Image (cartoon, rainbow, N blue to C red):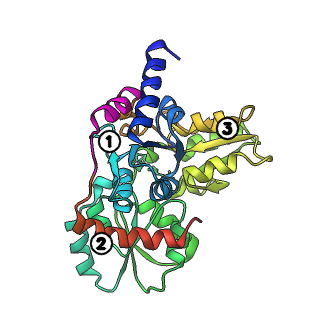
Amino acid sequence: MENRDAEVVEKISVLKKRRNAVILAHNYQPGEVQDIADFVGDSLDLSQRAAETDAGVIVFCGVRFMAETASILCPEKVVLLPDVNAGCLMADMITAEQLRAKKKEHPQAVVVCYVNSPAEVKAESDICCTSANAIRVVESLDAQEILFVPDQYLGHYVSTRTGKKMILWPGFCPTHVRIKPERIKELKREYPQAKVVVHPECTPEVIALADEVLSTGGMCRYAQRDEVREMIVGTEVGIIHRLKKENPGKRFIPVSEQAICPDMKLITLEKVLRSLEEMGTEVKVPEEIRLRAKAAVDKMLKVGRK
Ligand code: 13P
Ligand code: SF4
């Protein structure tokens, strides 16, 4: 570690105690940010941690929808996003107004909302899901018609696994569509023993080649199995840091080095420190929206993990 980084890490540690703060980081965060976090996980893990913590301040090293979910669950806590511009391109592919219009076209439909969405969209939805529990959430519904927003690929995957017909919103993750089936086929030839593990935000052609389709947290747990020695990883490259750190001696091969989420990479150690110094940027969901969004998130948390 560079001297400057060591100094910043030390200052973060001192301020964190003084502020009674907890640092939560997503599995796609830069390695040095993951390393100073109290907890690293997927969207579901992080929302559960946020709900459980007794810290007064949550520094959320991830993107806006994740910090919003923490704020929805813990309105009494100060939730800080170290870079105000850290958004999610998929979450930006839907607005509450657009969803309201779609609901008018399908008045009987139950709306299932992927957590990668704005709080206002959650507030218009019946139940939330993450990549870790989407199948269970949809299976739990007794509905003739399901409207799934905003990720068409996760929605398509869930409909193939549950046999439920769903109306799909045309959103997608620009990072995950960079993961190509041709490259997976090449890597399988190069590493015939490797397990192919991909995220459900990938296209159906990619999913068809996978041994396992898992959330980022699911990938980290799967990598720890004894029989997994080599893994071809179809998701954002930030996860490779954690996989290697927790599994020395195993080989992790990213399908695409270009599968980088630019928003996740906006968070740096310097910004985490500034966030704790200045107590910014606070993410707070207006109470009227929060209460309706919370109903959808709470229903999801009751269903639990996959
Ligand atoms: P996970 O919930 O699997 O960590 O996924 C979040 C995400 O944004 C994937 O692009
Ligand atoms: Fe959003 Fe894709 Fe980034 Fe995940 S990887 S936060 S879905 S843009």
Q: Is mark 3 within 8 Å of ligand 1?
A: no
Residue 296 percent coordinates (x, y): 38, 71
Callout 2 amino acid: Arg
Circle 3 crowding by C-alpha within 10 Å: few under 14, some 14–19, many from 20: some
Give the residue at mark 3. 246
The residue carrying pointer 2 sits among few (fewer than 14), some (14 to 19) or many (20 or more) residues within 10 Å by Cα, namely some
Whether the residue carrying mark 1 lies under 8 Å from ligand 2 is answered with: no
Mark with earlier residue (1, 2): 1
* Residues at marks 1 and 3, CA–CA distance in whole angstroms: 27 Å
Residue 86: image tag: 1
Quadrant in which the C terminus is drawn? bottom right
**CA–CA distance between discs 1 and 2?**
24 Å
Name the residue: 37% across, 26% down: 270
Circle number at residue 11:
none
Amino acid tagged 1: Ala
Element assignment for label 3: helix
Question: Reading the chain from its start, which is encountered first: label 1 or label 3?
Answer: 1
At x 42% / y 42%, what residue is drawn? 21
Query: Exactly how many numbered labels are in the figure?
Result: 3
Asked if one can make out residue 153 in the rendered structure from this viewpoint, the answer is yes
Label 1 with label 2: CB-CB less than 8 Å: no
- The x, y position of residue 235, in whole percent, is 53, 45
209 displayed left or right of 38? right
Give the mark, 3 or 2, whose residue is nearer the N terminus. Answer: 3
Q: Is residue 10 above or below residue 73?
A: above
Q: Is residue 68 above or below residue 33?
A: below
Please say whether residue 280 is one of the residues in the magenta stretch.
yes
Q: Which residues are magenta?
A: 269-283
| Residue 292, disc | 2
Question: What's the distance in space between the residues labelled 3 and 2, CA to CA?
Answer: 38 Å
